[in-house]
C-alpha cells in the first residue's frame, strides 16, 4: 500500500501545481538551456467568444507564373501583417493556406470594433508609388538640408507604381572595391522603364521618393537618366534591411488582387453572451451528473466526483499551458469529454458491483474491477482518439478539414479523453484505495437492491 | 441472463421505423444546407426601434429587399433579426444597415458572415473523406483488437445506423422547421461516429471476455450474457452524457443549439444501437455463417 501513498502524494502535488498555475496571474518564463518557455497563462478565447473578425482572402494568381506563386503569397502575407500591425491589433493571426490551385490568406483580428476600416485597410492592393517634387521652386532647394526633408511628403505621384515594377533584388555593390555594401536593385517592365526614363530625366540631382502604402520607404537622389529600366537604391543598408525593403517592394510590385471569400464578424456582446450561457449550461449539467453519480454509487460516486473536479482543474491548466484557443465548439467538446470521463468510472463501478456480488472482499473486488474494466475503457477511448485525430488533421492534409471550428472541437475532445483516462483510472483508484483503508471496509454489498436475481425485466 | 437475442427481429424492425423515414426524407428532400455549404451571407442585427415602429421580419424585409438578393429574414427575439441572403460584402452591408437605421431604428451588428460558394463544396468533400477515413481506421482497429472482422464490420454498421438516423432527422427538421445543416453539424456527425463505436466496444469487450471464461456457452448465449451485463452501464453512462447535452441544449447559446441536438440524437441512438443493433448483428452474422457451412441451423 506504500505505492498508493506515493501516488496519493503525487496527485495532491499535481493538483497543487495546477491550482497554483491557475491562480497565478503573472506570466511564467522558464529557461532550460537554450529553450525558453513563456506563457502568460490567460485562457485564450476564440473569435466567437471574444468578438472580432475572421477573414479568408483569396489571391488571384492568374497573372503570376507557377513557380513564383508561393513567393507572391508570402509577400502578400507580409504586407497584410504590416497593415494589421499598423492598425494596432493585438494577437492578430495572419497565415497562408494553399489548397490545390487556390492560394489563400487567413486573417483573424480579435476584438476589432471598427471592422469596416480594418477590412478596407487589408483589402487594398499594396501601393508602391514613385513621387516627385512638382513645386515651381524645386530647382533651388537644397535637398540635403533637414528642413527640405519634410517637402518629400508633399511630393506628387509620378504615375509610376508597383504595377510597373518587374522585380526587386538584393545585390552587393563593389564600387569602392573595399567593402561591398548591400543595395536594392529594381527592374521595371517595358512601360515602366519608359516612364522611369522620363522621371529620372526631369529630376536629375533631385530626389525621387518611393512610397509604399503611403509610407516613405526611401528617397534616393537621381544622378543620371536611367533608360534600361534598372535602378539601384543604395543607402546605409544592412543585408537584413536591404532584403526587407526588397520584400516590401516585391510585395508592392506584385499585382496580386485579393478578394474576400469568407468573412465573419462577431460582436463582443454576442461572444460574452455565449460564454455566460455555456458556463451556466456546463455548471448545471455537471451538477446533475454529480448528483446522479452520488445517488447511484454513494461514496464511490462522491470519490468519482472529486476525480472529476481534478479532471476539470488539470484540463483548464493544460488549456492555458499549450495554449488552446477556446471556441464555442471547443466548449462543447470539453463538456462532452466530461461525459466520457464519467463513463470510465461508471464502467469501473459496475464491474466493482459485480465483483462484490460474487462475494469478494472490497480491496480485491476493487483491483479486479479496475483491471477488467481497463480493457474496454482502453479500446473505447482509442476509438475516440482516432476520430479526434482525423478531425484535428495534425499533418495538415489538404484533403481533410482544416476549419478552425472543427479543430477546436476535436482538440478539446482529444485532451479531454486523454486526461480522463488518467483521472478516471489513476485518480479514482487512488482515492478509492485510500477510502477503502480509512473505512476498513469489510466484504459488503454496495447496494443490495442490485443483487442478481433481485432484478427482473418484464421480457421473457 | 436475459435472452435478449430471441427478439432480435423486433430490434431490427424498431431500427427500420427510424431508418425508412430517414431514407424517405433524405431521398426526397435532402438536407437544407447552411451558408457554410452554399455560400452566402448572414447578417445578425439588433434593432432598437424608433417610437411607433413595429418590428417584424416583413418590415425588415421591406427596406432591404431591393439592396440584396434576400433569402430569408428570421426574427430571433423581439429585437434581433437574422438576414440571410446571396453573398454580399461589407460595403453593401453598410447600405443595408443604413436603410434599416433610417426607417426602423438604431442598428447594432452582432454577426456578419459571408462565405464564397467554393468554400462550401470543399467542406462537403473534406467531411465525407474524413468520415470514410475515420470509419476505415476504426474498422481496422476494432477488427485487430477483436481478431475477427465481424466485430469491425458490425461496429461500423451500428455506427452508420446512428449517423443515418441523425442525418435523417435533420432532413425532416429541415423540411418542417427549416433547420439548416452547417459545419458544426458535420462535427456533431463525426462525434457520433466515435461515441457510437465507443459504446459498441464496451459490449463487444464483454463478449470477448466471456468467450474466454465460458467456452462451452453458445455464441448467442455469450452475446445475451454480455448484453445483460452491460445494459446497466450503457444506460447510466448515456444518462450522464444526456444530462450534459440537455443542459447545453436548454441553457446554451443559440449558435450551438442544433449542434447539441444532433449530439443528443446521436447519443440516444448510439446507446440503443450498441445493444440492440451491434450485438444482434453479430448473432445474425454467426447464424448465417453456420447455415452456410453446415446444412443444420
Image (cartoon, coloured by chain):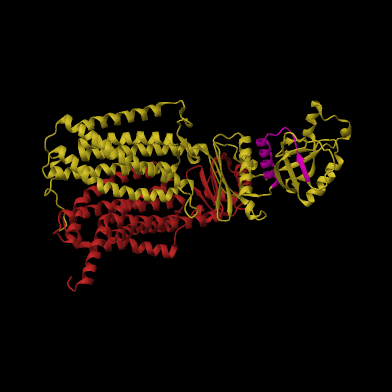
Q: Tell whether A8 sits left or right of A224.
A: left
Furthest-front residue in this view:
A178
Q: Tell whether B136 sits left or right of B217.
A: right
Q: Tell whether A203 sits left or right of B217.
A: right
* Range shown magenta: A230-253
Chain letter, red in picture: B
- Counting from the top left corner in percent of width and height, residue B261 is at 38, 49
Q: How many labels does the image show?
A: 0
Q: In which quarter of the image is residue B25?
A: bottom left
At a point 29% along the width and 30% down the height, the residue shown is A10
- Counting from the top left corner in percent of width and height, residue B44 is at 53, 45
* Quadrant that contains the C terminus of chain B: bottom left
- Counting from the top left corner in percent of width and height, residue A176 is at 77, 35
Q: In the figure, what tint was chain A given?
A: yellow
- Counting from the top left corner in percent of width and height, residue B226 is at 20, 54
At a point 17% along the width and 72% down the height, the residue shown is B296
Question: Is residue B203 a member of the stretch shown in magenta?
Answer: no
Q: Nearer the viewer, residue A194 or B243?
A: A194
Q: Nearer the viewer, residue A95 or A136?
A: A95
At a point 28% along the width and 40% down the height, the residue shown is A424
Question: Is residue A243 a member of the stretch shown in magenta?
Answer: yes
Q: Nearer the viewer, residue A127 or B70?
A: A127
Q: Is the magenta stretch mostly helix, strand or loop?
A: helix
Q: Tell whether A128 sits left or right of A280.
A: right
User: Where A297 falls versus B154 (above or below)?
Assistant: above
Amino acid at each position: 500500500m506504500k505505492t498508493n501513498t506515493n501516488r496519493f502524494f503525487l496527485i495532491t502535488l499535481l493538483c497543487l501545481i495546477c491550482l497554483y498555475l491557475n491562480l497565478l496571474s503573472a506570466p511564467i518564463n522558464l529557461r532550460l538551456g537554450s529553450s525558453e518557455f513563456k506563457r502568460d497563462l490567460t485562457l485564450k478565447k476564440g473569435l466567437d467568444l471574444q468578438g472580432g473578425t475572421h477573414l479568408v482572402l483569396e489571391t488571384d494568381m492568374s497573372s503570376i507564373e507557377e513557380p513564383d506563386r508561393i513567393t507572391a503569397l508570402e509577400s502578400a502575407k507580409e504586407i497584410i501583417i504590416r497593415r494589421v500591425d499598423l492598425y494596432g491589433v493585438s494577437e492578430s493571426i495572419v497565415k497562408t493556406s494553399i489548397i490545390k490551385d487556390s492560394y489563400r490568406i487567413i486573417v483573424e483580428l480579435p476584438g476589432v470594433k471598427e471592422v469596416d476600416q480594418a477590412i478596407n485597410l487589408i483589402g487594398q492592393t499594396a501601393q508602391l508609388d514613385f513621387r516627385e517634387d512638382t513645386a515651381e521652386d524645386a530647382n533651388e532647394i537644397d535637398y540635403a538640408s533637414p528642413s527640405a526633408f519634410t517637402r518629400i511628403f508633399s511630393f506628387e505621384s509620378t504615375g509610376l507604381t508597383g504595377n510597373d515594377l518587374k522585380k526587386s533584388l538584393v545585390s552587393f555593390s563593389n564600387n569602392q572595391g573595399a567593402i561591398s555594401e548591400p543595395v536594392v536593385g529594381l527592374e521595371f517592365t517595358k512601360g515602366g522603364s519608359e516612364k522611369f526614363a522620363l522621371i529620372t530625366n526631369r529630376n536629375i540631382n533631385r530626389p525621387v521618393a518611393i512610397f509604399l502604402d503611403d509610407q516613405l520607404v526611401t528617397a534616393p537622389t537621381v544622378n543620371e537618366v536611367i533608360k534600361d529600366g534598372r535602378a539601384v537604391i543604395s543607402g546605409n543598408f544592412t543585408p537584413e534591411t536591404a532584403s526587407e525593403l526588397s520584400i516590401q517592394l516585391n510585395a508592392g510590385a506584385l499585382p496580386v488582387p485579393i478578394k474576400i471569400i469568407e468573412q465573419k464578424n462577431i460582436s463582443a456582446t454576442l461572444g460574452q453572451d455565449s460564454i455566460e450561457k455555456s458556463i451556466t449550461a456546463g455548471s448545471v449539467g455537471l451538477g446533475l451528473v454529480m448528483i446522479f453519480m452520488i445517488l447511484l454509487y454513494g461514496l464511490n460516486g462522491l470519490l468519482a466526483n472529486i476525480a472529476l473536479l481534478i479532471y476539470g482543474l488539470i484540463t483548464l491548466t493544460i488549456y492555458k499551458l499549450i495554449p488552446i484557443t477556446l471556441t464555442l465548439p471547443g466548449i462543447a467538446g470539453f463538456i462532452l469529454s466530461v461525459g466520457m470521463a464519467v463513463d470510465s468510472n461508471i464502467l469501473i463501478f459496475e464491474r466493482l458491483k459485480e465483483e462484490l456480488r460474487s462475494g469478494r472482499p472490497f480491496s480485491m473486488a476493487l483491483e479486479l474491477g479496475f483491471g477488467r474494466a481497463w480493457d474496454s475503457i482502453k479500446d473505447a477511448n482509442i476509438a475516440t482518439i482516432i476520430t479526434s485525430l482525423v478531425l484535428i488533421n495534425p499533418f495538415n492534409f489538404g484533403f481533410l478539414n482544416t476549419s478552425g471550428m472543427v479543430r477546436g472541437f476535436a482538440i478539446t475532445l482529444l485532451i479531454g479523453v486523454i486526461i480522463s483516462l488518467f483521472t478516471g483510472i489513476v485518480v479514482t483508484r487512488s482515492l478509492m484505495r485510500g477510502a477503502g483503508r480509512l473505512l476498513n471496509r469489510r466484504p459488503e454489498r454496495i447496494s443490495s437492491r442490485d443483487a442478481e436475481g433481485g432484478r427482473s425485466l418484464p421480457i421473457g | 441472463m436475459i435472452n435478449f437475442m430471441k427478439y432480435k427481429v423486433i430490434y431490427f424492425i424498431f431500427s427500420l421505423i427510424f431508418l425508412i423515414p430517414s431514407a424517405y426524407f433524405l431521398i426526397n428532400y435532402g438536407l437544407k444546407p447552411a451558408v457554410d455549404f452554399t455560400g452566402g451571407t448572414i447578417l445578425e442585427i439588433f434593432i432598437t426601434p424608433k417610437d411607433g415602429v413595429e418590428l417584424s421580419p416583413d418590415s425588415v424585409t421591406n427596406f432591404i429587399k431591393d439592396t440584396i438578393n434576400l433569402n430569408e429574414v428570421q426574427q430571433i427575439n423581439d429585437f434581433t433579426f437574422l438576414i440571410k441572403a446571396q453573398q454580399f460584402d461589407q460595403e453593401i452591408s453598410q447600405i443595408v444597415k443604413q436603410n434599416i437605421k433610417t426607417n426602423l431604428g438604431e442598428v447594432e451588428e452582432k454577426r456578419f458572415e459571408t462565405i464564397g460558394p467554393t468554400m462550401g463544396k470543399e467542406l462537403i468533400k473534406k467531411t465525407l473523406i474524413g468520415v470514410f477515413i475515420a470509419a476505415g481506421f476504426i474498422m481496422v482497429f476494432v477488427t485487430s483488437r477483436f481478431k475477427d472482422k465481424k466485430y469491425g464490420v458490425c461496429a461500423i454498421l451500428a455506427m452508420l445506423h446512428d449517423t443515418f438516423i441523425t442525418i435523417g432527422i435533420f432532413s425532416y427538421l429541415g423540411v418542417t422547421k427549416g433547420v439548416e445543416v452547417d459545419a458544426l453539424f458535420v462535427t456533431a456527425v463525426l462525434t457520433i461516429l466515435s461515441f457510437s463505436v465507443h459504446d459498441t466496444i464496451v459490449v463487444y469487450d464483454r463478449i470477448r471476455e466471456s468467450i474466454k471464461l465460458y467456452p462451452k456457452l453458445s455464441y448467442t448465449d455469450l452475446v445475451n450474457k454480455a448484453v445483460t451485463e452491460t445494459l446497466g452501464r450503457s444506460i447510466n453512462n448515456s444518462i450522464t452524457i444526456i444530462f450534459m447535452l440537455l443542459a447545453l441544449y436548454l441553457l446554451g447559446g443559440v449558435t450551438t443549439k442544433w449542434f447539441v441536438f444532433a449530439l443528443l440524437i446521436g447519443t440516444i441512438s448510439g446507446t440503443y444501437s450498441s445493444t440492440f443493433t451491434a450485438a444482434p448483428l453479430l448473432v445474425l452474422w454467426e447464424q448465417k455463417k453456420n447455415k452456410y457451412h453446415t446444412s443444420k441451423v
